[in-house]
Each structure stands twice: as C-alpha cells, then as structure tokens.
C-alpha cells in the first residue's frame, strides 16, 4: 500500500494539484485508522517536498460504506475523527 500512496501522491503533486485520501473509517477499527493515517503522513513528510504537504489531506469517510453483511456503516463518529486528526497532524484533515 505504501508504494501506491507514494506514486499517486507524487503524480498528483507533480501536476500542481491537491490530493485527498479518503479513509473509510466505517470499515476499519481504531487501530487500523491510526495505522493508515500514520502511513500516509510518514510518506508525505519523508518523501514529498515539505511545501507540498499543504496540498495533501485526509478525509474520514465517504459515508457510503456498506459491510459485507449489508449493514450501512458509513458515518464517521467523533472518536474516529479524533483518531484521524491525531494520527495525521501536522497535515490537514478535511
């Protein structure tokens, strides 16, 4: 997954655009949310020019996730958003 994050972020930033990574928080537990946010943050801060960091942000969910059992799980809750914010700081959360 790290290679995809690196390559996609680099291509978007190279074109002068903003990249938004959407994490389907309804599909993940708290530890997985933190792990994904930290991975994106680490890649952006380690491999991208720091000036580009302001053009990379993460969003908590699309609000359209449905589990394999057919249950709707789309809304992010306050705890999920706090986890995203803490794990992704100093980058932007939208």
Image: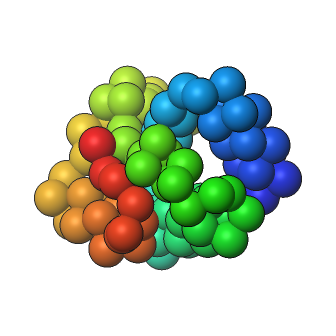
Residue occupying image coordinates x 19% and y 53%? 77
Percent position of residue 68, x then y:
55, 35
Residue occupying image coordinates x 71% and y 33%? 14
Vertical arrangement, residue 53 with respect to residue 87, above or below: above
Residue occupying image coordinates x 55% and y 27%? 17
| Residue 59 visible in the shown view | yes
66 left or right of 38 in image: left
Residue located farthest toward the left when viewing the structure as drawn: 78
Q: Which quadrant does the N terminus fall into?
A: bottom right
Kindly indicate the quadrant of the structure image that contains residue 39. bottom right
94 left or right of 4 in image: left
Total label count?
0
Task: Decide which of 3, 34 is in the foreground and name it.
Answer: 3
Task: Decide which of 35, 5 is in the foreground and name it.
Answer: 5
Percent position of residue 7, x then y:
80, 43
Percent position of residue 82, x then y:
23, 67
Kindly indicate the quadrant of the structure image that contains residue 43. bottom right
Residue occupying image coordinates x 53% and y 35%? 19
Residue located farthest toward the front when viewing the structure as drawn: 51
| Residue 1 visible in the shown view | no
Percent position of residue 89, x then y:
36, 70
Kindly indicate the quadrant of the structure image that contains residue 94. top left
Task: Decide which of 70, 27 is in the foreground and name it.
Answer: 27
Colour scheme used in the picture?
rainbow
């Amino acid at each position: 997954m790290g290679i995809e994050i690196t390559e996609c972020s680099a291509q978007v930033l190279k074109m002068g655009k903003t990249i938004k990574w959407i994490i389907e928080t309804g599909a993940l537990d708290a530890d997985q949310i933190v792990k994904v946010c930290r991975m994106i943050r680490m890649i952006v801060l380690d491999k991208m020019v720091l000036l580009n960091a302001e053009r990379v942000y993460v969003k908590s969910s699309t609000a359209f996730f449905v589990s394999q059992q057919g249950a709707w799980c789309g809304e992010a809750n306050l705890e999920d958003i706090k986890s995203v914010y803490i794990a992704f700081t100093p980058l932007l959360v939208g």
